Image: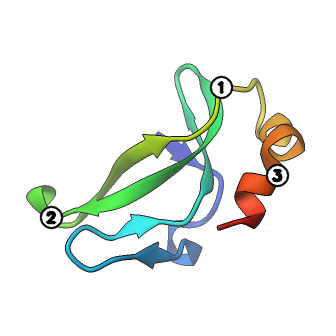
């Protein structure tokens, strides 16, 4: 998992299992808009939480086609 934003700049919401704002992320399948969480079962380690969009070839494509999801965060 890669994220385009510095993890120190990512906003998290919630207390029991904090979930991030919508962020541009990448997996082996491509780039997408998703979220990470601080998993309490893993000592608060940051892990993927959910994928909200299809996969795209580049982070620029994600911003172009999914920009409204990033603004809503």
Horizontal placement of 52 versus 45: left or right?
right
Can you tell which mark lies on residue 40? 2
Measure the C-alpha gap from mark 1 to mark 3: 14 Å
Measure the C-alpha gap from mark 1 to mark 2: 28 Å
Classify mark 1: helix, strand or loop: loop
Image quadrant containing the C terminus: bottom right
Give the residue at x 26% y 80%: 15
Q: Are marks 1 and 2 in contact (CB under 8 Å)?
A: no
Classify mark 3: helix, strand or loop: helix
Classify mark 2: helix, strand or loop: helix
Location of residue 22 (image quadrant):
bottom right
Q: Position of residue 62 (x, y in %)?
A: 78, 39
User: Which mark is first along the chain, 2 or 3?
Assistant: 2
Nearer to us of marks 3 and 2 is 3
User: Which mark is first along the chain, 3 or 1?
Assistant: 1
Residue behind mark 1 = 55
Q: Are marks 3 and 2 in contact (CB under 8 Å)?
A: no
Horizontal placement of 12 versus 44: left or right?
right
Give the residue at x 13% y 65%: 43
Q: Nearest the camera: 1 or 53? A: 53
Decide: is 19 above or below 62. Answer: below
Q: Position of residue 58 (x, y in %)?
A: 78, 32
Mark 1 crowdedness (10 Å alpha carbons): few <14, some 14-19, many ≥20:
some
Location of residue 53 (image quadrant):
top right
Horizontal placement of 62 versus 47: left or right?
right
Q: Position of residue 23 (x, y in %)?
A: 61, 56
Residue behind mark 3 = 67
Decide: is 36 above or below 14. Answer: above
Mark 2 crowdedness (10 Å alpha carbons): few <14, some 14-19, many ≥20:
few
Give the residue at x 21% y 66%: 44
């Amino acid at each position: 998992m890669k994220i385009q934003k510095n993890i120190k700049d990512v906003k998290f919401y919630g207390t029991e299992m904090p979930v991030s704002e919508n962020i541009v992320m990448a997996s082996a399948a491509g780039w997408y808009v998703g979220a990470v969480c601080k998993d309490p079962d893993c000592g608060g380690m940051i892990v993927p939480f959910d994928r909200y969009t299809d996969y795209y070839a580049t982070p620029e494509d994600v911003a172009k086609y999914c920009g409204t999801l990033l603004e809503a965060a």
